[in-house]
Amino acid sequence: MWLYLLRRIVTSSLAVIVATMLVFGLSRFLADPRYTLIGQAGYGMSQEMWEKLGDELHLNDPVPIQFGYWAADVLRGDFGKDLIDDRPVLPKLQQKIGPSAKLGLVAWVIATVIGIPIGVISAVTRGSMIDYCCRTFALFGQAVPTFFAGILAILCFTVWLDWLPAAGMGEGFAVKHYIMPASVLAWLPAAGYLRFTRSAMLEVLDSEYIKLARAKGVSNRSVIWNHAFRNASLIPLTATALVLAGFITGSVLVEAVFAWPGIGQYAVQAVQTNNINVLVPIVLIFTVLFIVTNLIVDLMYGLLDPRIRYT
Amino acid sequence: MSSRPYSDTPRNGLLRAGNDFLEFFKRWPVIPIVILVFLVAVAVFAPIVTAHEPLDGNLRHRLLPPVGQEGSMSTHILGTDHVGRDVFSRVAYGSRVSLMVAAVALLTGTTLGTLLGLIAGYFGGLVDELISRIVDIWFAFPFLMLALLIAAVVGQGMTTLMGLLAILIWSSYVRYVRAEVLTLRERDYIALARVAGASTWRILLKHILPGVTNTVVVVATLRAGQLVLAEAALSFLGAGLPPPTPTLGSMISDGRDYLREAWWIAVCPGVAIFLMVMSLNFLGDWLRDRIDPRLRQL
């Protein structure tokens, strides 16, 4: 167990390091950083300034040393300046993490609360109208592009019905502002959870010990929730890694659609203005978040299911 | 096993009739194929089936609604957008771009992934270890973030987009192909080929590749829908093809600002994407169940 833990932590750290190197490489070598970093102001720059900038970025040093300088800056939290207004990026990011985290958390709760129970119900009522409805819900969730779902929601609830606001997050915890973005963001992960829970439940419900429980005369509800679901509930947990990838993509799209003042929207604006200094830390944050969550899920899996022995 | 409480057969008659109906369509994916053929035909023959150029705007005819609504014009079946461009033409040309980008990316990613999978599985050892670890790390990357970064550094364009989408999918082939090759390479006919003096590449391409084709085809169909979605998402975010190229994603993004006056600008391309992805997914599921049910977990 401890050996596995150690190995898992080592490979995850390795993934983080490789990820940083990749991000560094992509932002430096696909194009001369002097072009991407100076933006508009760079036109008509003199040769001396051009070389001075090269020195500042350590462009004449060997690549590993360049990476060293860059990594040191990153570790200190120095991501450079926003190329649009020349202000440091870090405080802006700190300001935008909050809204993104709140939206993500609400959506995650919705996805879990909807996806997993519906998956159970869908498995238990297999072949009935309810089951078909649940599966259609999942099918659509995986085929409707997140941003289009958002647009349809705005069209329906803002333009036609005029119930909910279409943009921004309002003051304090304005529930009305959360309803649409969080539900739209939750749809895809809910569909994922639903499918995984359903197939896990179907497998468990077919096993011998469930038959025994039924033969003993255990009530239907108890069979489903205490006997079957307990064992099936681990599968959606392992699916979290898969669901999470879609969730990160989704949160960027949802923030763009609903003008949510979070990191995702900031990233999208940065792409449209080729604002590398903003993009690099955001990509790093999301990548590290992704890797760490995967690690946590893996370790939790061992804690929750004592049958699993890591060898 | 009639005692099994959770059987596949629906309980009441109407549902059973509905189920038989569904079973038929599950066996033969008629609807997805019809929809897909229709969409592809419209995309391929876009210059013939559309009456307007996708980029020609006519400001006197801006924001016209689709046919059947008040104030519509019969020449603009799906209405016009905020600068008077024909929405139907733009959807047709946009689908054309989407499908072309997705097809090229699919082909590139499939070739790359299959080749690496073949190499990793056949040679094993250090090569396998290296390729497998790269794939592991690749899976740990949130794709969209990477795509946004590359789009911002290199700038938007057709080649960039195709490359990005190709690297989105290559890794999944490596895993499945590799697993398949691991069992294939132990077969007697491979040993025989080796004894007969066949070169390594000949063995890989002539003897092993045919054995993994099924898997590759199934994975490719399942990934096609994902590619269309990813392309749309990137163009929606402004990291896809630069304007004025009509793309479905950028049309939705334009339409967002005109939802109040003209819902059709955003809804028409959205429905096109939805139909495309839905039918591709159905087709992929069907192929998987037909050819290779072992790939269920995909």
Image (cartoon, coloured by chain):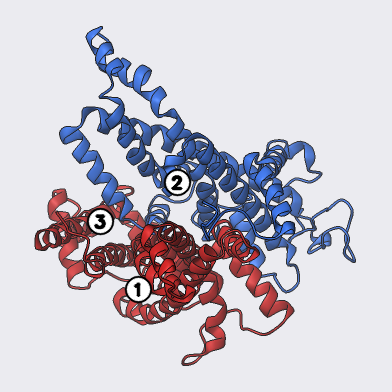
Residue A27, image x, y percentages: 31, 55
Q: Nearer the viewer, mark 2 or mark 3?
A: 2
In the figure, the shade used to draw chain B is blue
Element at badge 3? helix
Distance from disc 1 to disc 3, alpha carbons, whole Å, reads 27 Å
Check disc 2: other Cα within 10 Å, few if <14, some if 14-19, many if 20+: few
Residue B281 on image: x %, y %: 56, 47
Q: Which mark is residue A203?
A: none
Q: Quadrant of residue A76?
A: bottom left
Chain to which the residue tagged by mark 3 belongs: A
- The reply to whether dot 2 and dot 3 touch (C-beta < 8 Å) is no
Q: Quadrant of the C terminus of chain A?
A: bottom left
Q: Earlier in the sequence, mark 1 or mark 3?
A: 3
> Which one is nearer the viewer's eye here, B102 or B295?
B295
- State the SS at label 2: helix
Instruction: Identify the amino acid type marked 1.
Output: Asp
Residue B94 placement, left or right of B231: right
Residue at the spot of label 1 = A86
Q: What residue would you read off at disc 2? A: B296
Which chain's colour is red? Answer: A
